[in-house]
Image (cartoon, rainbow, N blue to C red):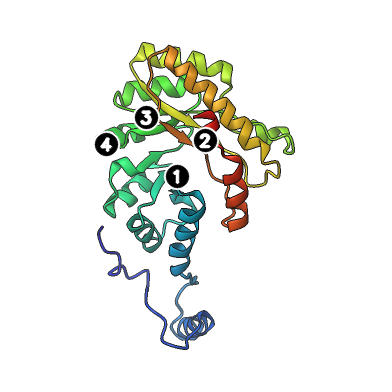
């Protein structure tokens, strides 16, 4: 991992004994008032370590991939990388950012649902092979620009408590998965897994069970085409609370479907 402490845009340090985050914020306000510096934000990087421990305690079989768009501060990314977290990147700039911190291509997923050809070519050159796909136009674009790509078919999930617009945001249908696999086989592109996403606003945990069942169907379908799938992406939307993680973990009965 490369260091980021030399970056003048960020200041990282340990609190003195007895000091609080409120003290740090007050000192920053005082300094910025007198120097005319720009607005700032303060974060507790120790929370990242605590959240990772929480994840490992509850969701240990599942490797987390952090969406870089949520917070691309180098300090945040380097700590997560050191903890062994993978990264979900939606653009070339995000891929470059995490690779500059020494993250291996195997720990990066290119998640943009509508990718630019130039950025697919960059991913190919950088050895970033795992990417998301949910339509044949995208599939053909990937085949032309990244023949070594390893695709996760993004399937739609249905949350009966959400509105129709949210349900139909991204992802393909089970029926269309067969068409996509036929296209992938013809184009010589590997399909290695399935992705689904349950909205963080979803209150019905049964949605995860339906999504797992659908994913199992896609895995079975893949065998018909000779694809050996070994990856399941369960999406994001987690609030970070231990209670929610436990509730989700309790319904994710992988042994039932896989």
> According to the image, label 3 marks what residue?
117
Q: Residue 7, position in %: x, y?
A: 31, 67
Residue at the image point whose x is 42% and y is 46% from the top: 63
Q: Counting other residues with Cα less than 10 Å from the Cα at mark 3, is it few (<14), some (14-19), or many (20 or more)?
A: some
Q: Give the alpha-carbon distance from disc 2 to disc 4, as whole Å.
A: 30 Å
Element marked by disc 2: helix
> According to the image, label 2 marks what residue?
254
Tag in front: 3 or 1? 1
Say which label, 2 or 4, has the lower sequence index: 4
Residue at the image point whose x is 57% and y is 39% from the top: 252
Say whether marks 4 and 1 touch (CB < 8 Å): no
- The vertical placement of 199 against 1, above or below, is above
Report whether residue 241 is seen: no
Residue at the image point whose x is 27% and y is 69% from the top: 6
Q: Counting other residues with Cα less than 10 Å from the Cα at mark 4, is it few (<14), some (14-19), or many (20 or more)?
A: some
Say whether marks 2 and 1 touch (CB < 8 Å): yes
Tag in front: 2 or 4? 2
Residue at the image point whose x is 36% and y is 28% from the top: 150
> According to the image, label 1 marks what residue?
61
Q: Give the alpha-carbon distance from disc 2 to disc 1, as whole Å.
A: 10 Å
Q: Give the alpha-carbon distance from disc 3 to disc 1, as whole Å.
A: 34 Å
Say which label, 3 or 2, has the lower sequence index: 3
> According to the image, label 4 marks what residue?
127
Say whether marks 2 and 4 touch (CB < 8 Å): no
Q: Counting other residues with Cα less than 10 Å from the Cα at mark 2, is it few (<14), some (14-19), or many (20 or more)?
A: few
Q: Residue 246, position in %: x, y?
A: 59, 51
Say which label, 3 or 1, has the lower sequence index: 1
- The vertical placement of 182 against 79, above or below, is above
């Amino acid at each position: 991992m490369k260091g980021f402490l030399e970056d003048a845009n960020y200041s990282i340090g340990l609190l003195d004994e007895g000091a609080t985050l409120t003290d740090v914020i007050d000192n920053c306000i005082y300094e910025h008032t007198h120097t005319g510096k720009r607005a700032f934000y303060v974060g507790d990087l120790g929370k990242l370590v605590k959240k990772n421990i929480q994840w490992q305690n509850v969701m240990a079989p599942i490797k987390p991939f952090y969406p870089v768009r949520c917070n691309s501060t180098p300090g945040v990314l380097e700590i997560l990388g050191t903890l062994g977290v993978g990264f979900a990147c939606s653009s070339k700039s995000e891929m470059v950012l995490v690779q500059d911190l020494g993250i291996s291509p195997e720990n990066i997923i290119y998640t943009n649902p509508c990718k630019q050809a130039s950025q697919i070519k960059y991913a190919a050159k950088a050895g970033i092979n795992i990417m998301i796909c949910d339509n044949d136009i995208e599939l053909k674009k990937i085949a032309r620009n990244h023949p070594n790509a390893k695709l996760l078919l993004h399937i739609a999930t249905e949350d009966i408590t959400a509105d129709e617009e949210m349900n139909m945001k991204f992802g393909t249908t089970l029926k269309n998965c067969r068409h996509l696999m036929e296209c992938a086989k013809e184009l010589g592109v590997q399909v290695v897994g399935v992705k689904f996403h349950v909205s963080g606003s979803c209150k019905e945990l049964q949605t995860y069970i339906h999504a797992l069942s659908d994913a199992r169907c896609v895995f079975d379908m893949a065998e018909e085409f000779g694809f050996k799938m070994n990856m399941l992406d369960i999406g994001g939307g987690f609030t970070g609370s231990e209670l929610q993680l436990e509730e989700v973990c309790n319904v994710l009965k992988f042994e039932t479907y896989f």
